[in-house]
Amino acid sequence: MLNLTEQKATLAELELLVAVRCRVLRAANQLPEDTPLPEVESQTRTYYQKAFAENTHTAYLLWDGETLAGTGAVSYFQVMPTVHNPTGRKAYLMNLYTAPQYRRQGIATRILTRLVEDAHRRGVTAISLEATAMGRPLYEKFGFVPMEHEMELPE
């Protein structure tokens, strides 16, 4: 039986957050688990230090005793106001990840719920994410819909 506890991450968990970010990127990009990502690690450390200082990022960790069962995060940013988003405040969900042995037990849904609640507490309703094929059913069940009007300029 699972003994789950939630933790809202702080800068005290910096190295764990960096490691989790790299784990998520390796999984999402189908890279071997031992693929070195030194630049990503360095830039992620810098990102977290700035984002936590400015309160523009929330991360949740879900523990089963001493084992990290799942994680997720939301980053906040500001764009020009629009008719559909008059505040211009936006949230971008990322790093939603469940360890393989904990999948299909509601962990990702629980974390996703906390992240959306965090955004709503801040008055942010424009919430988006980039979904992997594995994550898409969860997000659709939660109510996310594919975006039709955005485009991206490849690097």
Image: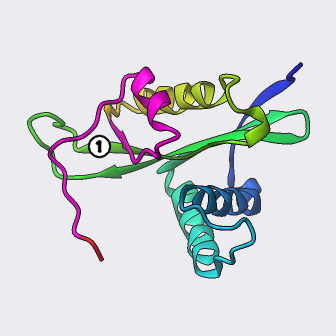
Amino acid at pointer 1: Arg
Q: In this view, does 45 lie to the left or right of 118?
A: right
Q: In the rendered structure, does residue 82 fall within the stretch colored magenta? A: no
The segment highlighted magenta reads 127-153
On the image, which quarter does residue 103 sit in? top right
**Residue lying farthest left?**
83
Instruction: Tell whether position 144 is magenta.
Output: yes
**Residue underneath mark 1:** 89
Secondary element at image label 1: strand
Q: Is the magenta stretch mostly helix, strand or loop?
A: loop
Crowding at dot 1, Cα within 10 Å, few <14 / some 14-19 / many 20+, comes out as some
19 displayed left or right of 143:
right
Q: Where is residue 108 in the image (x, y as percent from the top left)?
A: 61, 31
Judge left or right: residue 58 versus residue 10.
left
What x and y, as percent, mark residue 8?
Answer: 67, 38
Asked whether the viewer can see residue 60, the reply is no
> Looking at the image, which is closer to me, 109 or 51?
109
- Residue 86: where, in percent of width, then height? 16, 37
Q: In which quarter of the image is the N terminus?
A: top right
